[in-house]
Image: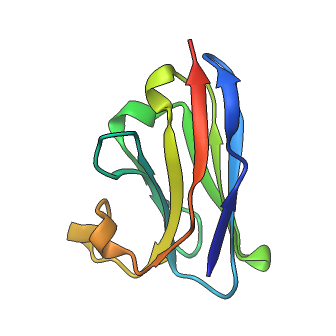
Amino acid sequence: QLQAYGGGLVQAGDSLKLSCAASGRTSVMAWFRQAPGKEREFVATTGRSGNSALYRDSVKGRFTISRENAKNTVYLQMDSLKPEDTAVYYCAAGQPITSTMRTPVGYRYWGQGTLVTVSS
């Protein structure tokens, strides 16, 4: 079970940090987001060690994914937020293969989502 929290209403240029706590040990963890009327899209993912990460191009240099295995928690630090970052953010966990690392089908477990709204 995954529990995501930390969303809220911020202004463009602000920062926000999302957290996702897992009820048990997890392997690969990721963040996805879904804006109204759009499909769920990949944001970032990191492996068990937290030493490697992948990001979608539009968030590179602004978002940072990290994890704290002692707390079974993954974080998403979001800086320089833009209105186009507005979405419901979901955390996910699983054991994707390379070809599914950036797709929802690669992850078996999902959190309930937390809304991030960025005003201009």
Q: How many labels does the image show?
A: 0
Q: Looking at the figure, which quarter contains the N terminus? A: bottom right
Up the image or down, 53 lies above or below 98; here it is above
Q: What residue sits 45% from the left and 35% below the top? A: 60
| Left or right: residue 27 compared with residue 97 | right
Work out which residue is located at the far bottom of the displayed protein and give it. Answer: 24
Q: What residue sits 64% from the left and 87% below the top? A: 25
Work out which residue is located at the far right of the displayed protein and give it. Answer: 71
In the rendered image, is residue 59 in sight?
yes
**Residue 48, quarter of picture:** bottom right
Q: What residue sits 58% from the left and 25% below the top? A: 118
| Left or right: residue 107 compared with residue 28 | left
| Left or right: residue 33 compared with residue 81 | left
Up the image or down, 57 lies above or below 23; here it is above
**Residue 120, quarter of picture:** top right
Work out which residue is located at the far front of the displayed protein and give it. Answer: 37
- Give the camera-side residue of 97 and 107: 107
Work out which residue is located at the far left of the displayed protein and give it. Answer: 99
Q: Position of residue 106 (x, y in %)?
A: 31, 74
In the rendered image, is residue 53 in sight?
no
- Give the camera-side residue of 32 and 61: 32
Q: Position of residue 67 (x, y in %)?
A: 66, 64
Q: Which colour scheme is used?
A: rainbow
Up the image or down, 75 lies above or below 3; here it is above
Q: Position of residue 58 (x, y in %)?
A: 38, 32
Up the image or down, 66 lies above or below 56; here it is below
Q: What residue sits 64% from the left and 57% below the top? A: 66
**Residue 98, quarter of picture:** bottom left
